Image (cartoon, rainbow, N blue to C red):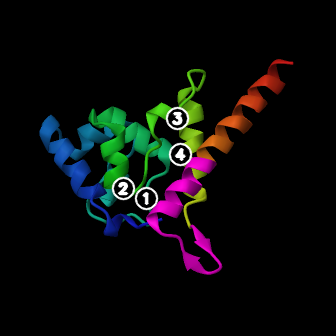
Amino acid sequence: MPSINETGLGDFIEQSIYKNGWSIRKAALQIGVSAAYLSKIINHKADSNPKPQTLDKLSKGLKVPRKELYEAAGLTLINDDSIPAWATEKDITDLNEYLETNKPMNFQGVELDADAKEAVQQFLVGYFWKRRKQEKNDAHE
């Protein structure tokens, strides 16, 4: 996972706060995170990228598109076309966490190129939805 220092997440959040005319404290209240944590992200002092759940809270609270926020964090947000109609917000957040934990993609010690990573990610998305649907079906039986 790229560190916040290597991404534009802090700058993106700072600009979003400025556009809303908020202080860091007001933004933190809107988002539901501490002002100290928000300040660490903005100042590139956080140890790692926020979890997908936190990114979703940031997106909602700052009133910015999730896709833009994830890209600023150096992450790939799943394509909305691949989300089944029955999926909940929690399902989507769980998928993003699943993809993030499976992010390092190497084959025989060599990092995969962009096309191979895309193919693996598409497989993981399909596999995730297949398993999630089965879990939901099993829960209803």
Q: Residue furthest top?
A: 140
Q: Residue beneath label 4, please?
A: 96
What residue type is disc 4 on? Answer: Asn
What segment carries the magenta color?
105-123
Q: Nearer the viewer, mark 3 or mark 2?
A: 3
Q: Nearer the viewer, mark 2 or mark 1?
A: 2
What residue type is disc 2 on? Answer: Ala
What residue type is disc 3 on? Answer: Ser
Residue 49, position in %: x, y? 43, 58
What residue type is disc 1 on? Answer: Asn
Magenta stretch: residue 23 in it?
no
The residue positioned 32% from the left and 69% from the top of the image is 5
Q: Secondary structure at mark 2?
A: loop
Q: Residue beneath label 3, please?
A: 82
Which comes before the other along the chain, label 2 or label 4? Answer: 2
Side of 130 where 95 appears, left or right:
left
Q: Are dots 2 and 1 in contact, CB under 8 Å?
A: yes
Which comes before the other along the chain, label 2 or label 1? Answer: 1
Q: Secondary structure at mark 3?
A: helix
Q: Residue beneath label 1, please?
A: 49
Q: CA distance from mark 2 to mark 1?
A: 7 Å
Dot 4 crowding, Cα within 10 Å, few <14, some 14–19, many 20+: many
Asked whether residue 30 is in view, the answer is: no
Which comes before the other along the chain, label 1 or label 3? Answer: 1
Residue 126, position in %: x, y? 63, 41
Q: CA distance from mark 4 to mark 1?
A: 13 Å
Q: Nearer the viewer, residue 44 or 76?
A: 76
